[in-house]
Image (tube, grey):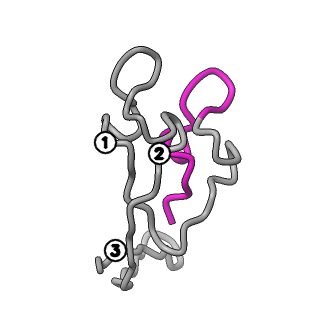
């Protein structure tokens, strides 16, 4: 179990923050399909581990649809893992 810091903007420059309890679990990296290798080298999304820690319940990235790539390279939203960060 981890605690995640969340910021909220309130009128102008005022910022409020809170900590929420968040469960994380390892999920298979979708960029390398769990092999740890991508494009002839270490996978950029998981660093060669084959798994990434994902906030639970796990959700597929809404931008790349879980592929880990969009347009001309790694998906900027999920960092190539294929999983939504929050």
Q: Which residue is mark 3?
A: 5
The reply to whether the magenta stretch includes residue 82 is yes
Q: CA distance from mark 2 to mark 3?
A: 24 Å
Query: Which badge, 2 or 1, is on the more N-terminal residue?
Result: 2
Spot occupied by residue 15 in the image (x, y as percentages of width and height): 40, 75
The reply to whether the magenta stretch includes residue 81 is yes
Horizontal side, residue 30 vs residue 52: left or right: right
Spot occupied by residue 16 in the image (x, y as percentages of width and height): 39, 81
Q: Are marks 2 and 1 in contact (CB under 8 Å)?
A: yes
Horizontal side, residue 28 vs residue 48: left or right: right
Q: Which residue is mark 1?
A: 49
Highlighted range, magenta: 69-86
Residue drawn 47% across and 51% down? Answer: 28
Query: Which badge, 3 or 1, is on the more N-terminal residue?
Result: 3
Q: Is most of the magenta stretch helix, strand or loop?
A: loop
Residue drawn 63% across and 57% down? Answer: 60
Q: Quadrant of the N terminus?
A: bottom left
Spot occupied by residue 72 in the image (x, y as percentages of width and height): 63, 21
């Amino acid at each position: 179990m981890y605690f995640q810091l969340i910021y909220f903007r309130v009128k102008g420059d005022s910022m409020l923050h809170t900590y929420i309890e968040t469960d994380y679990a390892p999920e298979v990296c979708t960029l390398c399909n769990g092999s740890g290798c991508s494009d002839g080298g270490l996978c950029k999304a998981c660093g060669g581990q084959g798994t990434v820690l994902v906030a639970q319940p796990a959700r597929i990235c809404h931008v790349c649809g879980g592929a880990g790539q969009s347009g001309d390279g790694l998906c900027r939203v999920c960092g190539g893992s294929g999983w939504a960060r929050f």
